[in-house]
Image: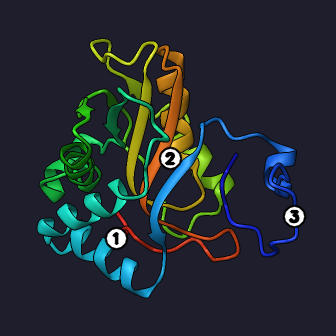
Amino acid sequence: MCQHPFGSDHLAGEALCARCLVESPRHDGIVAATIYGDVSRAMILALKHGGRIALAGPMGRALAARFADRAGQDPVIVPVPLHRWRLWKRGYNQSALIARSLARARRWQIEPQALRRIRRTPSLGGMNPGQRRKALAGAIEIDARAKVKGRTVVLVDDVLTSGATSDACVRALKSAGASKVIVACYARVPFADPVPQTETPEA
């Protein structure tokens, strides 16, 4: 379900972790290029805050190499959206850049404007999972023109931390009729790790 690695290799293939036993994920699987660590953190921060947009190319290609046939024959790629003010401030959406690289590598369709962040949210860095979910409640909606009904959607983000952002996106996509939503991220934070600071605080 969450596809987080167990600490033991002596468990049956259908075993579930405690989190999934308590609450099944809304998504239909996770694909990550790498685990969040010193190197991946440096790349993500350089892309998000250092203007190193060329990094999105190899990040997307690394993610593409992890997919195999898990998304089927005709998925549509949708990036996690930024609020317009953060997009204006940064100048680009790093998740959309990674999504475009993934789309080129796999020759998949991309819907870059399928999701919209309609409410400005505070920086999520340093928040616990419950605080993140509360901050994102009602912040993301589907564009009425998005062609996701009956499709498998690959939802792309740079880093997956608590899953609150992806959960809000998955909720919006499935409410619009998406048959499956697979979360794709460049780096994944292990459950045992603290929530990383990947955003600069906002006033």
Q: Identify the residue position indicated by label 3 in the image.
A: 11
- Residue 134 lies left or right of residue 36; in this view the side is right
In the rendered structure, which disc, 2 or 3, sits on the residue that comes first in sequence?
3
The part of the image, by quadrant, that contains residue 5 is: bottom right
Q: Name the mark on residue 200.
A: 1
Q: Identify the residue position indicated by label 2 in the image.
A: 165
* Residue 117 visible from this viewpoint: no
Helix, strand or loop for disc 3? loop
The part of the image, by quadrant, that contains residue 83 is: top left
Helix, strand or loop for disc 2? helix
Give the answer, above or below, for where 93 lies relative to 71. below
The amino acid type of the residue labelled 3 equals Leu
Residue pictured at 87% horizontal, 64% vertical: 11
Residue pictured at 63% horizontal, 54% vertical: 131
Q: Count residues near mark 1 (Cα–Cα under 10 Å), then give few for <14, some for 14-19, many for 20+.
A: few
Count of labels in the image: 3
The amino acid type of the residue labelled 1 equals Thr
Of residue 50 and residue 54, the one placed in the foreground of this image is 54
Q: Nearer the viewer, mark 3 or mark 1?
A: 3
Give the answer, above or below, for where 61 lies relative to 152. below
* Residue 91 visible from this viewpoint: yes
In the rendered structure, which disc, 3 or 1, sits on the residue that comes first in sequence?
3
